[in-house]
């Protein structure tokens, strides 16, 4: 199973970016997909999570600015980030809680994509 992220980059404060993460491989089911981020010198934190049932959670500091969505048919999760701030600068990691056939569910991680918000 692989998680491949795309969409990071450099953007000015107030700008927007859209991150995508596609899960591929031998997947039986996906319980939840989400985005975490880690800034230099800080712990990794959950930014947004969406479950297979459609429940969504956001980090308080991104509520109203970020939107997570999911395409179940494509095993893909998106993060639309608007009104970006310099403090949003971080490596963003895709996460999926999923099951491969015959195996218990576990967490999988992408390699990360860098988002830099700077003028």
Image: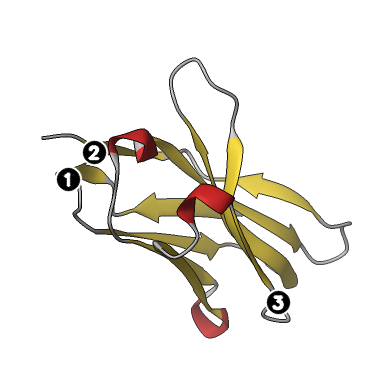
CB atoms at circles 1 and 2 under 8 Å apart?
yes
Give me the C-alpha separation between circle 1 and circle 2: 5 Å
Q: Which residue is mark 1?
A: 11
Is residue 44 at all visible to an observer of this figure?
yes
| Residue that extends furthest to the left in the rendered view of this protein | 119
Q: Nearer the viewer, residue 17 or 76?
A: 17
Q: Give the mark nearer the N terminus: 1 vs 3.
A: 1
Q: Which residue is mark 2?
A: 117
Residue 7 placed where, x, y %?
28, 54
Q: Give the mark nearer the N terminus: 1 vs 2.
A: 1
Q: Quadrant of the N terminus?
A: bottom right
Say which mark, if any, is on residue 52.
Answer: 3
Residue at disc 1, secondary structure: strand
Residue at 55% x, 72% y: name it: 75
Q: Is residue 78 left or right of residue 58?
A: left
Residue 48 placed where, x, y %?
57, 57
Residue 42 placed where, x, y %?
54, 21
Residue at 69% x, 65% y: name it: 32
Q: Give the mark nearer the N terminus: 2 vs 3.
A: 3
Residue at 54% x, 84% y: name it: 73
């Amino acid at each position: 199973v692989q998680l491949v992220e795309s969409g990071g980059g450099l953007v000015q404060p107030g700008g927007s970016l859209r991150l995508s993460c596609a899960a591929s491989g031998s997947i039986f089911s996906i319980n939840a997909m989400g985005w975490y981020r880690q800034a230099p010198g800080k712990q990794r934190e959950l930014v947004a999570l969406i479950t297979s049932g459609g429940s969504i959670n956001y980090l308080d500091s991104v509520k109203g600015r970020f939107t997570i969505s999911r395409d179940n048919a494509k095993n893909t999760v998106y993060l639309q980030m608007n009104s970006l701030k310099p403090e949003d600068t971080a490596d963003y990691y895709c996460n999926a809680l999923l099951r491969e056939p015959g195996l218990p569910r576990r967490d999988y991680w992408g390699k990360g994509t860098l988002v830099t918000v700077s003028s």
